[in-house]
Amino acid sequence: MGRVYLGRTPAGSAVAVKVVHREYAGDASFRKRFQQEVAAARRVQGLYTVPVVDADLRAEEPWLATAYVPGPSLQYAVAESGPLSADAALGLIARVAEALQSIHAADVIHRDLKPSNIILTAEGPKVIDFGIARAADVTAVTATGMRTGTPAYMAPEYIRGRTSPRPVMSLPSV
């Protein structure tokens, strides 16, 4: 849906800038969804989440800038070094659970929590990529019957179309 670039703010801080592909930028439905997602992401504040720095929703190619988080994804770290130790896994789970609590406290459903969307830093994990997040209080604007997310990490009840994923189902899939 877009490309991500490393950029800098006027003050010199590193940011990750997601620019929407031109073919999606012309779709009014997509723009509405993107606007809702940016608004939802702005509400999320937590130690283990990444803040929105700026966005331009009216640009020819809309974009979103978040703080840049250096570090490997959980997916990359496990692929390179193997499974985490029990202690490391428990610490990670506790911090990701705290991130999910911050996300859900802002009435946001991430909808794509997976190892590649968890960045490992010295300060702890950071949950990233709210690209398909949805505000819990906003009616979905995806095409009827469509599910968004990565199938291998979706909550079973969500795949079956019964309900939105519950917070309790987000973490065990990772």
Image (spheres, grey):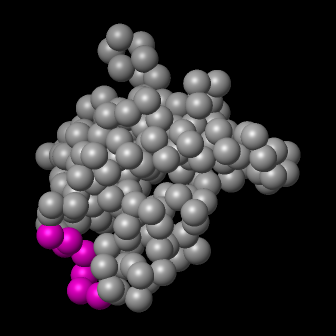
Q: Provide residue 38's location: percent of width, then percent of height.
A: 24, 47
Q: Provide residue 101's location: percent of width, then percent of height.
A: 38, 46
Judging depth in this view, the residue of 82 and 1 nearest the camera is 82
Q: Quadrant of the C terminus?
A: bottom right
Question: Is residue 138 shown left or right of residue 22?
Answer: left
Magenta segment, principal secondary structure? Answer: loop
Residue farthest to the right, as pictured: 81
> In the rendered image, is residue 60 in sight?
no
Q: Provide residue 58's location: percent of width, then percent of height.
A: 14, 46
Q: Which residues are magenta?
A: 139-145
> In the rendered image, is residue 91 in sight?
yes
> From the viewer's perspective, is residue 124 above or below residue 103?
above
What residue is at 65 percent from the left and 39 percent from the top? 91
> From the viewer's perspective, is residue 123 above or below residue 100?
above
Q: Provide residue 106's location: percent of width, then percent of height.
A: 25, 46
> From the viewer's perspective, is residue 97 above or below residue 55?
below
Residue 156 among those drawn in magenta: no
Question: Is residue 53 shown left or right of residue 117?
Answer: left
What residue is at 37 percent from the left and 67 percent from the top? 166
What residue is at 75 percent from the left and 40 percent from the top? 87
